[in-house]
Image (tube, rainbow, N blue to C red):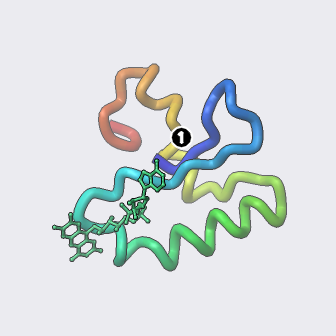
Amino acid sequence: MISTVPGHPGLIVAAGFSGHGFALAPGVGRRVAEWLRTGTVPDVLRPFDITRFERGERRPGI
Ligand SMILES: Cc1cc2nc3c(=O)[nH]c(=O)nc-3n(C[C@H](O)[C@H](O)[C@H](O)COP(=O)(O)OP(=O)(O)OC[C@H]3O[C@@H](n4cnc5c(N)ncnc54)[C@H](O)[C@@H]3O)c2cc1C
């Protein structure tokens, strides 16, 4: 998940990368920094929002 957390304003979590966290870290860090700088969630990160679990999606878009 790469997401704000309902009930915790200002908190952004980027976690749960399983065995790919090192490889994904540079791109994720760049996009999250862009998000913090602009205040807008980059489109590429939207599928990883925590609210997908409430919709019953186990993986982004699935
Ligand atoms: C065996 C194994 C092999 C892997 N191989 C690869 C690979 O080949 N390529 C790849 O891209 N990724 C790999 N990964 C995944 C990668 O290691 C993780 O995705 C990455 O380390 C996650 O980074 P992180 O900073 O989010 O979390 P972490 O590296 O888990 O860091 C979290 C830190 O928070 C600390 N912490 C936890 N709770 C508290 C607390 N309450 N107070 C203070 N500190 C706390 C922990 O001690 C830890 O230092 C592998 C993972 C494992 C387990």
Quadrant placement of the C terminus: top left
Q: Residue at x 51, y 75 (%)?
A: 27
Q: Nearer the viewer, residue 46 or 23?
A: 23
* Residue drawn at point x = 68 percent, y = 25 percent: 7
Looking at the image, residue 18 sits to the left or right of residue 15; the answer is: left
Q: Classify mark 1: helix, strand or loop.
A: loop
Horizontal and vertical percent position of residue 52: 46, 31
Image x and y of residue 6, in percent: 64, 27
In the image, residue 13 sits, relative to residue 51, either above or below, namely below
Res 44 → quadrant: bottom right
Q: Residue extending furthest left? A: 19
Residue 53: x %, y % from top left: 41, 27
Residue 40 at what x, y percent from top left? 77, 53
Q: Residue type at mark 1?
A: Asp
Q: Is residue 59 above or below residue 13?
A: above
Classify the position of ligand 1 by quadrant: top left, top right, bottom left or bottom right: bottom left
* Relative to 62, 31 lies left or right: right
Dividing the picture into quadrants, the one containing residue 19 is bottom left
Residue at 45% across, 20% down: 54
**How packed is label 1: few (under 14 Cα within 10 Å), some, or many (20 or more)?**
some
Q: Which residue is mark 1?
A: 49
24 left or right of 11? Answer: left
